Amino acid sequence: MSFATVSSAQVHLLKTNLVRVEVDLSKGLNAFSIVGLPDKAVEEAKDRISAAIKNTGFKSPRQKNHKIVISLAPADVKKEGPSFDLPMAIGYLVASKYLPAKVGDKLFVGELSLEGKVQPVDGVLPIVREAKRAGFKEVYVPLENAKEAALISGIQVYGVKNLWELVAHLAEKDILPDEDCPFIQKRKLKPVPQTKFEVGTREYQVDFADVKGQRTAKRGLEIAAAGGHNIAMWGPPGTGKTLLAKAFISILPPLALEEALEVTGIHSVAGVLQEPLITYPPLRAPHHTASYIALVGGGSIPKPGEITLAHRGVLFLDEFPEFERRVIDALRQPLEDRIVNVARVKGSAKFPAHFTLIAAMNPCPCGNRGVKGKNCSCAGHEIARYKRKISGPIVDRIDLWTEVSVVEHEKLTEGRGGEEASETVRKRVAAARTRAEERYQQLKLPFKTNSEVGARDIAAAIPLSDEVKKTLNIAAKKHDLSARSYHRLIKLARTVADLEGHEDVLESDLMEALQYRPKQIADS
């Protein structure tokens, strides 16, 4: 009888795949089939599409005496989720001659309710980016996803409320009523205005001024924020480790546009997006009982985990040694390469994982070891097992180790006046990052923060004077530093120099960086 092709897309393993929806109608016994590796949600679309078309006023596909075959191409890629409902419905209406329209330069995504409403779906932002790259002129998305989609410039975005108004918009002329279809007057939708990239004010749960004392830990967090370095805090319970970690995001600068789009796309695909655009670094704080898959990602069809959701932000692991040993060891690759590879039977994926790790821990399982006026109840083997949970390779990948000691009770009742506010610290962090980024731009190196510098570029990116090299090598031998720790110490010293406004790394910068080398927690 007739044939129609409509374009759509899906996000699979954070990669956007364009999908061609082909609809063929032919005479024969009534049948409706969807081919092209559809999952259960796509298979069930037959009933949703039939009801939505019927409740829009057209005759249901199941009432027509013809065979319907919908092919989702390419056929060798698994099709998942309800986002193909809308393009399949439009394809059927075009193929059946109900809808006189040309849809070749348009892309559609959306779920249909039984009454014909277009429901929101996940992953709209990366789909629209891919549609623009592929040369589509218009994209049609659920109304609830429209602001998110309109972040992408250079392509017209339409927010669709229901199937009726989409048909009225696409129709080249009024649809006249007959026994199979209603009267629909041609009526154009307005494109959604582009969502502007605006970094608004952000309310933080904790300000640096709310944390009493802990100047050493605050300085360590400032250095970590300025250079994108990983940091571990250790000390007895109740000294403010969690409070400091929550305050950390208040000293981080907002995301740049491309970073914001990248982070928003990841959260959209994961189905956890709470706002049209994420403009500040995200903070993810999974509980220590979180599983390996929850942290790293995975499942039968690999999905991003907390590591990827913390991309361009902060991953806070409280009670660090209480996490499973394999969960802790799984951090090795992302901390080094800033990606995480997840391999499963049904596919493998490479997820981005460029985050700052903040680990917090007690000096022993009971938390009282080395605390004045308290007795430790831990047996020797319990302390040894507690320490062994954090392997040498993980220790090597954490740049700063700082103690969070007990605060004097008198300080706890003091006001904010004696403490530095987050806004002041954030300005210093932003200035240090700007210095680093400008330096690497001049050197034509693809880095924004000091922590990103690789071993092959470190000599060119961070030159050291003979005097500083001599001090560095003496310290490296004294502390028996590995090659990785040696390079990380150089990068840490460079960040200290940026915070101090030094053109070159001074010996004082190196000595401060050395103070944050890991110490024996159990001997504190």
Image (cartoon, rainbow, N blue to C red):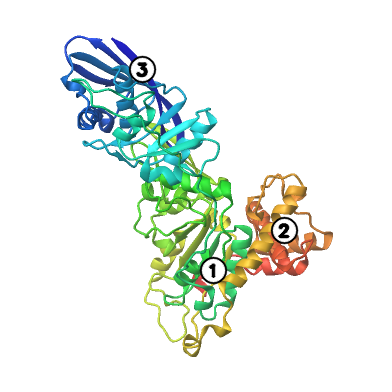
100 relative position to 67: left or right: right
Residue at which label 2 appears: 435
Q: Mark 2 or mark 3: which comes first in sequence?
A: 3
Q: Nearer the viewer, mark 1 or mark 3?
A: 3
Q: Quadrant of the N terminus?
A: top left
Residue at which label 1 appears: 520
**Which residue is found at the position 39% from the left and 67% from the top?**
382
37 relative position to 65: left or right: right
Classify residue 328 by image quadrant.
bottom left
Q: Nearer the viewer, mark 1 or mark 2?
A: 2
13 relative position to 434: left or right: left
Q: Disc 2 marks which amino acid?
A: Arg
Where residue 201 appears, x then y in whole percent?
52, 64
Classify residue 174 by image quadrant.
top left
Q: Mark 1 or mark 3: which comes first in sequence?
A: 3
Where residue 499 appears, x then y in whole percent?
69, 66
Residue at which label 3 appears: 4
Q: Which of marks 2 and 3 is in front?
A: 3
